[in-house]
Amino acid sequence: MGSDMDISIVIPARNEELTIYSVVCAAKQHSAVKEIIVVDNASTDRTQERAISAGATVVECPKVGLGYAMKAGVAKARSRYILRSDADIDNWQPDWIELLLPSETNSLTRGIYRSPYSQLPMSNYVVRPYLELFKPEWAHIPIPTTGTYLFDRNNYNFDLLPNNWAIDIAILFRALETHPEKVKNILIGTLSDRQRQVPHYIQMATDLASFMMCYFKASVASLITQESIQNTDDQLGLKGQQFVDFPLS
């Protein structure tokens, strides 16, 4: 394996006309790249036109959602190994591909980066608290929500993966379940992507939290016992109050 392998790059994109051309041009410079697939996720700008002009194959995905876009791209890809990348990166480096190429089958190699401005709120303030509570042996994983990683498509049933922002951590969690020793975290330097407004992060956080509530359902349910509820009521001075019980299933 290594530099003699072929990979397909899948780039979900929605309204990324400012950066998609340079991303594709940088990514196609590496000899391992068999094809670059840009998934146009209901863009209303010139994303598709710019991607084609850079030499990418464009797949249209009218259903809005990162998971939908990823599934459309993987379905089109011809290679076993898929490099997933964001479309809004303004300093994409071909060297990243060399760093992320796996040395063995069933690997998940994840790009770990420095952000010039972001505190990585989704990783640090949404995903990591769940890991600390319910899967502490995974809590050390750097940037759980990184959108730059290379994986073996044969390890995943994409029909069962989320259709939204949670697909990246679903892929990570699956790898940690099945081949934890083959999850590699590779430092790739600084990655500069587009700064987002708060509404963008609200939807992302909602999707991530919903996925993890389902993933850790049994652990969450075990915390919500009559004893813990009683203790909480006592602490809050709610003893004797009547509330509606919501089913856990």
Image: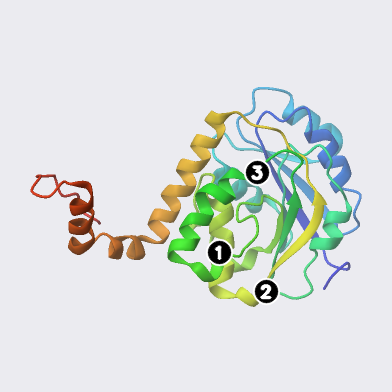
Say which quarter of the image contains residue 44. Answer: top right
- Report the residue at 64% width, 55% height from top: 143
Q: Looking at the image, do the residues carrying marks 2 and 1 touch, with CB atoms under 8 Å apart?
A: no
Q: Name which residue type carries label 1.
A: Ala
Q: Name which residue type carries label 3.
A: Gln
Q: Which residue position holds label 2?
A: 182
Q: In this rendering, which labeled residue sits more in front, label 2 or label 1?
A: 1
- Report the residue at 55% width, 64% height from top: 139
- Report the residue at 50% width, 42% height from top: 205
- 219 with respect to 97 (left or right): left
Give the image location of residue 85, x and y in percent. Answer: 72, 48
Callout 2: helix, strand or loop? helix
Work out whether mark 2 precedes mark 1 in sequence or the reverse, and give the earlier one: 1
Q: Nearer the viewer, residue 158 or 232?
A: 232
Crowding at dot 1, Cα within 10 Å, few <14 / some 14-19 / many 20+, comes out as some
Q: Quadrant of the C terminus?
A: bottom left
Please count the marks in the image: 3
Residue farthest along the top direction in this orientation:
45
Work out whether mark 3 precedes mark 1 in sequence or the reverse, and give the earlier one: 3
Tell me the tag on residue 139. Answer: 1
Q: Nearer the viewer, residue 60 or 99?
A: 99
Q: Which residue position holds label 3?
A: 119
Give the color scheme: rainbow, by chain, secondary structure or one colour: rainbow
Using the image, determine if residue 51 lies above or below residue 161: above
Crowding at dot 3, Cα within 10 Å, few <14 / some 14-19 / many 20+, comes out as few
Work out whether mark 3 precedes mark 2 in sequence or the reverse, and give the earlier one: 3
Using the image, determine if residue 219 lies above or below residue 36: below
Q: In this rendering, which labeled residue sits more in front, label 3 or label 2?
A: 3
Callout 3: helix, strand or loop? loop
Give the image location of residue 241, x and y in percent. Answer: 10, 45
Q: Name which residue type carries label 2.
A: Lys
Give the image location of residue 173, x and y in percent. Answer: 54, 64
